[in-house]
Amino acid sequence: MLNFEEELKKFKPCLEVEDIEEAVYQEDLTDMTDLLKELQKK
């Protein structure tokens, strides 16, 4: 059986769309194109 008090303590609200966009742009995300460009340089 679920313990709702414990589950509420663990709850973290999801980010709003604007916050998600900002968080993603702050990350250094390497994609396949970046990897291929690096390989071509070598």
Image (tube, rainbow, N blue to C red):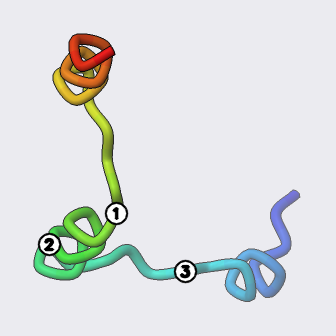
Q: Viewer-proximal residue, 28 or 13? A: 28
Q: Amino acid at mark 2?
A: Val
Q: Amino acid at mark 1?
A: Glu
Query: Quarter of the image containing the C terminus?
Result: top left
**Residue depicted at 26% across the width and 30% down the height:** 31
* Helix, strand or loop for disc 1: loop
Gap in Å between the C-alphas at discs 3 and 2? Answer: 15 Å
Residue 26 relative to residue 10: left or right: left
* Up/down of 18 relative to 9, above or below: above
Q: Position of residue 24 (x, y in %)?
A: 26, 63
User: Which residue is label 3 attached to?
Assistant: 12
* Helix, strand or loop for disc 3: loop
User: Which residue is label 1 attached to?
Assistant: 27
**Residue depicted at 34% across the width and 56% down the height:** 28
Query: Quarter of the image containing the N terminus?
Result: bottom right
Which numbered disc, 3 or 2, marks the residue closer to the eye?
2
Gap in Å between the C-alphas at discs 1 and 2? Answer: 16 Å
Which numbered disc, 3 or 1, marks the residue closer to the eye?
1
Q: Amino acid at mark 3?
A: Lys
Q: Position of residue 8 (x, y in %)?
A: 68, 84
* Helix, strand or loop for disc 2: helix
User: Which residue is label 2 attached to?
Assistant: 17
Q: Which mark is first along the chain, 2 or 1?
A: 2
Which numbered disc, 1 or 2, marks the residue closer to the eye?
1
* Up/down of 4 relative to 28, above or below: below
**Residue depicted at 28% across the width and 72% down the height:** 26
